Image (tube, grey):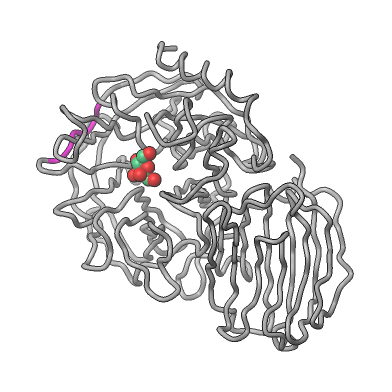
Amino acid sequence: MTSALSLANRAIQEKKDEINPRWYPSYHLAPQAGWMNDPNGLSWFDGYYHAFYQHNPYTPVWGPMHWGHARSRDMVNWEHLPIVLAPEGAEDKDGCYSGSAVVDGDRLALIYTGHKFHGQPCDDNLFQVQCLATSRDGVHFQRDGMVLDTPQGVHHFRDPKVWREGDQWFMVVGARVDDIGEVQLYRSADLRQWEYAGVIARADAEMGYMWECPDFFSLGDKRVLMFSPQGMTAKGYTNRNLFQSGYMTGQWQIGGEYCALQPFQEMDYGHDFYAPQSFETPDGRRVVIGWLAMWESPMPEKADGWAGMLSLPRELSLSAEDKLRMTPVKELESLRKEPHLWSVSQLKDQALVVEAHAEAMEIALEWDLSQSRAETFGLRLGRGASVHVDSQSQRLVVERDYPEHGLCGYRSVPLPAGNILSLRIFLDRSSIEVFVNDGEYSLSSRIYPAQDDRQLTLFSQHGQALIHKAQAWAMAD
Ligand code: FRU
C-alpha cells in the first residue's frame, strides 16, 4: 500500500468511532467517516458486488478525492474495505474523480478521471485525463497511469463509463466543449489505447453546459443514455434541484449515430439524487445506484463527522412508453423483520399514530384514489417530513421542513392515472425513498428528524381517504 493510501486508511480508522450516529444510515452505504459523493466502479467480480465511491477520508466536506470501497454478496449487506485510490500520481495529483469498473479476464479494472492543474487551480489550467488501475483480488489495485489524454482545447472531460460490446471496449466520457455539455465515445481493444469514436449526444440550448457521469446501456430493445447535466433551469415541477440526473431512451448500433426517441427525463424527482451509475448483475438485471445528496445542499450530518450516502440499489426496466421504471432490488426484502400491520382502512379529518418511533423501515401503502376526496392525505414522520397527496394539484408530494438546517420545500410527481396509488417507502435515519406504483416514479430526499421526533402518522385533512393496504417492516441493520 502506498503511503498516501496508508495515511487515508489510518484517518478512517481513527475517525470512524467518533461519528455521531443519530443520522447515520442503518441499511444504506455511507462512508465510515469523512465525505462521500458519486458511486463509482459498480461491478460484480469474484463473487462480490463492488461499490467504490468518491471519498474524502480526512474531513466531511468535498476535498482531495480518493476512491472508497465496499463489497457485498447481495447489494444489501456491505463490508467496508480499504481505500483503493489516493490522488498521488502525476496524472491524478489533484483528485481521483469518478469512473467505472469492468472485469478484464481475471482482473478488475478501474477506469477513472485523473484531475490535475498545471499551475494555479483555475479552469484554464485544468486537465482531466482518464486513468487505469487493475487488481487480481479486487482489494489491492495497481496504478497503471493515464490511458486517455484531454482532447485539445477541452478542460472538463471526466467520468468514464466503460463496457464491452462485440469484441471491443467502449467508453463514454462527459465533456464541456465551448460551454455545451456532451457525451463523447471512445473505443479500445485492450483498455489501454483508446480511439475517439464521435459524439453520442450534445446539449441543445436548454440542456446545460456540462454533462457529468454518462452511462450508456441496453435495456430491452432500447439504448439508454443516462447522464447528470449541470446548468439546466427549473421549469414548473421539473429540474428543481441544482443539478439533474436523467436519461433519454433511443437506438444505437456500433458505428452508428445515437438516435434519441424521447426528450430528457429525470431519473428521480426528490431533492437528493445525483450521479447515478448502472451495472449488470450476474443474473442479467440492470441496477442503478445514485448519490443520495445534492451539490450545495446543506448536509447537517457534517457536524457528525460524515457526509453523503448512496441510494438503495434499484432495478431498471422500461415501461410500455419507453420510460424508465426503478424498483428496489428484491434482495432488500431480506432485511425485513416481522411485519407491522397497521389496522386502518379509512381516515376522516384524522391523524392516526401508527409507530411511536420509526428509524429504519419499509412501508407499503395502497390508497384508493377514487374513494379519497380529502384535500390532503398521507404519511407524516415527526414534525418535518411527509409523503402526501395534494388533491388540488393532483400530485404526490414529498415535503421536508427543517428550517433549523436550511432544508425546506417540496418535490412532487403527478398522481397515477388509475384509481390505485401504491407506495413503497424506505425510511432510514436521514433518508426517505418513495417508489410510486411499481417504479413509475421515485422521489428520494434527505431528512433530518430530531431523535424524539420520529413518530409516524397517517392523516387526512378536509375529507376522507381510503386505504386498502398499510403495512410496514422494521429493517435489520
Ligand atoms: C459528479 C462529479 C463528477 C466528478 C466528481 C468529483 O458529482 O462532479 O463529475 O468526477 O463528482 O468528485
Residue 471 visible in the shown view: yes
- Ligand 1 lies in quarter: top left
Q: Is residue 164 visible?
A: no
- Name the residue nearer the viewer: 471 or 56: 56
* Residue 420, image x, y percentages: 69, 79
Residue 234: x percent and y percent?
37, 69
Above/below status of 303 relative to 396: above
Residue 469 located left or right of residue 105: right
The residue lying at 40 percent from left, 53 percent from top is: 217
Q: Is residue 67 magenta?
A: no
Task: Please provide the residue range marked out in magenta.
Answer: 146-151
**Residue 393 higher or lower than 242, as above or below:** below
State which quadrant residue 38 falls in: top left
Given residues 445 and 302, the one toward you in this image is 302
Name the side, left or right, on which 92 lies relative to 384: left
Q: Position of residue 213 (x, y in %)?
A: 36, 48
Q: Is residue 182 left or right of residue 21?
A: left
Question: Is residue 390 rendered to the left or right of residue 456?
Answer: left
**303 versus 393 height, above or below:** above
- The residue at the far right in this view is 343
Total labels drawn: 0
- Identify the residue shown where x is 58% and y is 18%: 14
Q: Quadrant of the N terminus?
A: top left
Q: Is residue 149 on the magenta stretch?
A: yes
Considering every residue shown, the one lying at the far left of the view is: 152
**Which of the image's four quarters has the C terminus?**
top right
Residue 438: give x, y in percent of width and height.
63, 67
Please name the residue shown 67% across and 52% down the image: 449
